Every structure is written in C-alpha cells, then in structure tokens.
Image: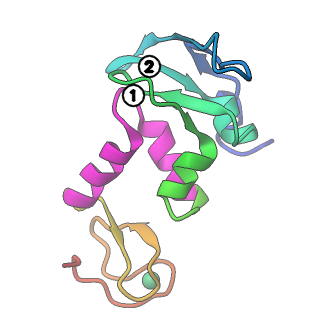
Amino acid sequence: MDNQNSERSNVIIGSYTPPDENGNGEIIKRVFFRQGKIFKDYGAFYNNPEEVCYIPELSDTTYTGNNIRGMCNNQEDMAEELFEQLDWQHPESLKEDWLVTGEWDYCDKCGKLFDCYGKTKCPHCGSDYNGGK
Ligand SMILES: [Zn+2]
C-alpha cells in the first residue's frame, strides 16, 4: 500500500469482537472520535472489506466496508470519502445529508455518484449538470 490512506490504514478507534456462530459474545467498545463515541477500523475498511469497520454512536448496527461501498454505487472514491467523514452518524444518514445539501448527486445520464458542488459536468460521462432536480 502506498496510497494516501496507507498511514491511516492501521488506525482503530475502539474495538469490536464479532459474535460467535451462535450469535453470542459480541463486544462493542466505543471511543470518542471528533464528534461522538464510535467504533471505526480503517484497516478493516481498506483491507478486509467483509469485516465490521464502523459502528455509529446511537445504534449497534455494524457496517462492513462492502456495506458502505454498496451505499456508494460501489464507487471506491465515494465510499472512501463517506467512510473517512463518519464520526458519529449512520452512513446512510450522512450520505442522505450530502445529497440533500448538494454536496453529492447522482448523474441523470450515467447514474453515478459524484461530488457535485460547483460542478457543471458529470466527471464520469461528461454530460451537463445544472444542480440536479
Ligand atoms: Zn454521468
């Protein structure tokens, strides 16, 4: 790994012990990070996409890297942006916030997500973008 995330890829905030095959023994230990108490495992997100990499502050819902990638059309750059910014909220909620506030949008033509703020063209297919909806 020599990308820009490599220095963070061994950062773990809190700890998580998954349940055994009978569903017992799950242990969630959250630690305060930026805005809330969460579990967040950068190495799991970047290197082990089927492992739990994030648990928000207000529920015990567990997310794997692939869950987060799935929310982002499996677009790696968008999934990384979403994961990096999580500090208390559910990833679905943060993504919805960004769609509502005009940070992110889906292209009408190609259907891909992109950082739409200030953009006049879709960076994926090049079709004109005028702020959506
Ligand atoms: Zn497009």
Residue at mark 2: 38
Q: Which residues are magenta?
A: 77-100
Taking the spot 48% from the left edge, 48% from the top edge, the residue there is: 81
Magenta segment, prevailing SS (helix, strand or loop): helix
Give how far across and how far down residue 62 sits, in percent: 52, 31
- Find out whether the residues at labels 1 and 2 contact each other: C-beta distance under 8 Å: yes
Q: Is mark 2 within 8 Å of ligand 1?
A: no
Label at residue 87 = 1
Alpha carbon of mark 1 to alpha carbon of mark 2: how far?
A: 7 Å
Give how far across and how far down residue 111 sits, in percent: 44, 79
Mark 1, mark 2: which one is toward the viewer?
2
**Position of residue 79 in the picture relative to residue 119 (left or right):** right
Q: Is residue 54 above or below residue 109?
A: above
112 in the magenta segment = no
Q: Is residue 127 above or below residue 106?
A: below
Which quarter of the figure has residue 43? top right
Q: Amino acid at mark 2?
A: Ile
Q: Earlier in the sequence, mark 1 or mark 2?
A: 2
Taking the spot 32% from the left edge, 22% from the top edge, the residue there is: 58
Provide the secondary structure element on which disc 2 rests.
strand
Q: Quadrant of ligand 1?
A: bottom left
